[in-house]
Image: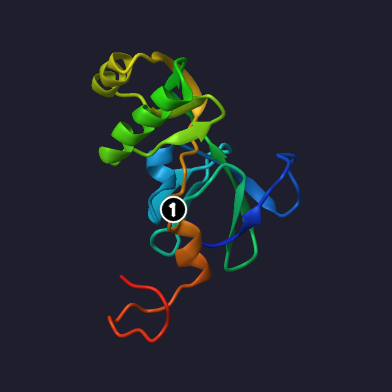
Amino acid sequence: MRKFTTMIGRKVSCEPTDSVVSELVLPYDTRKKSRFKAETTSGETLGVMLPRGQVLRGGDVLADADGARVHIVAALEPVSWVQGGTPQALARAAYHLGNRHMPLQVGENWLCYQHDHVLDDMVRGLGLQVTTVEAAFEPEEGAYAAHSQAHAHPHTGAHTHGHSH
C-alpha cells in the first residue's frame, strides 16, 4: 500500500497528469483526519499520513516518498444550505452554529453546514430558509489556522514574543 505523507499544493484544474496516480473522493469527515486509508477512484487502497491538524481541501495534491501524486476531490455529501433573511439573521445563525462548534461554510448571503435536522430547526426558528442539498463541503479553516501554520513553533509555555496563549 502506498503511503502519502506530503501535501504539495493545490491543483487548479482537474485534468489528469502523468504524475497523478488517481483521485481520492473524500467527505469532509475523512478529509479532516490526519491518518486514514482510502480507496482511489481506480480502486487502489492508499494510506494518508499527514501532520496532525492539517485538513485536506478539494484540489489538494499529495505525494508519496517516490513522488507519485494523488488528487483530493471533495465528495458530495448532505449539507444544510441556509439562505434568506437579513445579513443580521445570517450572522446570528453563524454565531449560534459556531457556539455549537459546527464547521461552517460561509458564502455571500448563505451558510452551509453538515446536515443536522435539529440544527435545521434552530436556524428556521431564527427566520431563515434551510434546504438539504448534496454538495462538496468546504468549511472555514478557523481564525487561527493561518497564524498557526505561518508561525509554527513548539508551545512550551515560555515565550518572549508578542502574543499570549
The quadrant of the rendering that contains the C terminus is: bottom left
Residue at (45, 55) in percent of width and height: 47
SS assignment at label 1: loop
| Whether residue 142 is situated above or below residue 42 in the rendered picture | below
Callout 1: 10 Å neighbours few (<14), some, many (20+)? few
Residue at (46, 49) in percent of width and height: 141
Q: Quadrant of residue 126?
A: top left
Amino acid type for the residue under numbered disc 1:
Ala
Question: Camera-side residue: 126 or 44?
Answer: 126
- Type of colouring: rainbow
Residue at (46, 51) in percent of width and height: 55
| Whether residue 155 is situated above or below residue 68 in the rendered picture | below
Question: Camera-side residue: 36 or 79?
Answer: 79
Image position of 43 (left or right of 156): right
Q: How many marks?
A: 1
Question: Camera-side residue: 109 or 20?
Answer: 109
Q: Quadrant of residue 19?
A: bottom right
| Whether residue 108 is situated above or below residue 69 in the rendered picture | above
Give the image location of residue 25, x and y in percent. 52, 37
Give the image location of residue 116, x and y in percent. 29, 23
| Whether residue 128 is situated above or below residue 162 in the rendered picture | above
Q: Which residue is mark 1?
A: 143
Give the image location of residue 117, x and y in percent. 27, 18
- Viewer can see residue 66: yes
Residue at (50, 38) in percent of width and height: 138
- Viewer can see residue 79: no
Image position of 104 (left or right of 18): left
